């Protein structure tokens, strides 16, 4: 279903702008966008504003953006669609989750997207910490061919990722692969297709309450 465009009226634009900066915490990202280069023409960051997207295209030649938040109703999303259309940047909406073990179909779909898009490209979630970290690790594994142990470092405290919170299920996902294949090596995709069970892995994972409280209630992560 096509979502109505709130930017078509002055009142709608103002409401979307306020939503982008206040409800979706864009005022924080205007100061710090958690922006890093992954190699191969891919960059990761938190949700960029229209001004930041314009800057990144001018400076890095961005041709594609992968929005890991999926299509949504935040004013931020409507402004992102608008600026991408104006600049000729291809916006690809897909969705990852920060507190659930990733599904095989989500991983495969993202891997296929890495092969299809035009580079240089930018990948983002809201804060650039958890879903962007997962996406960055998968990009390095599936597209650049990096070892899983090295790529998993994209989930790191320096990006704002907390391993001991509920978001630590993402670390547990990669750690499970490394543990299960340590004595009998199997490539990542084969493990996904033959051994991996997202529900079983999620059930094994237990987070520490105070860390989850910090991430969920104080930082308001999605």
Image (cartoon, helix red, strand yellow):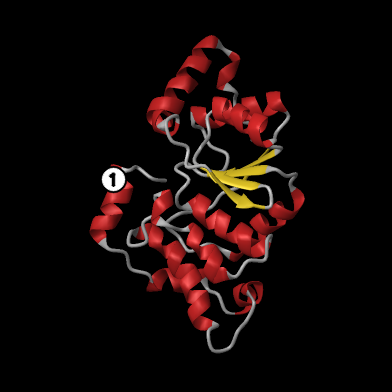
Residue 54 lies in quadrant: top right
Q: Which residue is labeled 1 in the image?
A: 217
Which is nearer the eye, 186 or 59?
59
Residue 138 lies in quadrant: bottom right
Q: Is residue 67 visible?
A: no
Percent of width and height locating residue 134: 52, 57
Task: Check the image and name the residue furthest to the bottom.
Answer: 183
Residue at 43% over, 57% down: 156
Question: On the picture, is 18 further left or further right than 48?
Answer: left
Residue at 42% over, 64% down: 169
Q: Quadrant of the N terminus?
A: top right
Percent of width and height locating residue 177: 52, 75
Which is nearer the eye, 174 or 205?
174
Percent of width and height locating residue 206: 33, 68
Q: Residues within 10 Å of mark 1 (few under 14, many from 20)?
A: few
Residue 122 lies in quadrant: top right
Task: Check the image and name the residue furthest to the top.
Answer: 10
Which is nearer the eye, 182 or 91?
182
Residue at 42% over, 46% down: 222
Task: Check the image and name the residue furthest to the front.
Answer: 59
Q: Is residue 120 visible?
A: yes
Q: Compared to 14, does 99 lie above or below?
A: below
In this figure, what is the number of numbered marks?
A: 1
Percent of width and height locating residue 114: 69, 53
Disc 1 is placed on an element classified as helix
Q: Compared to 15, does 183 lie above or below?
A: below
């Amino acid at each position: 279903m096509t979502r109505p465009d709130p930017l078509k009226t002055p009142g709608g634009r103002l409401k979307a702008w306020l939503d982008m900066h206040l409800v979706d915490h864009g005022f924080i990202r205007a100061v710090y966008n958690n922006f890093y280069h992954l190699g191969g023409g891919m960059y990761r960051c938190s949700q960029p504003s229209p001004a930041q997207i314009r800057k990144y295209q001018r400076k890095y030649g961005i041709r594609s953006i992968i929005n890991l938040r999926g299509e949504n109703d935040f004013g931020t999303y409507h402004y992102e669609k608008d600026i991408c259309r104006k600049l000729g940047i291809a916006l690809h909406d897909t969705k990852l989750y920060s507190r659930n073990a990733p599904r095989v179909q989500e991983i495969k779909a993202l891997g296929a997207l890495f092969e299809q898009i035009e580079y240089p490209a930018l990948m983002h979630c809201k804060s650039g910490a958890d879903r962007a970290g997962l996406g960055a690790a998968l990009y390095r594994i599936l597209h650049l061919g990096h070892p899983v142990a090295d790529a998993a470092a994209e989930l790191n405290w320096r990006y704002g990722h907390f391993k001991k919170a509920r978001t630590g299920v993402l670390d547990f996902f990669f750690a499970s692969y490394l543990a299960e294949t340590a004595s009998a090596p199997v490539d990542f995709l084969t493990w996904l297709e033959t051994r991996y069970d997202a529900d079983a892995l999620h059930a094994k994972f237990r987070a520490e309450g105070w860390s989850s409280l910090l991430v969920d209630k104080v930082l308001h992560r999605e």
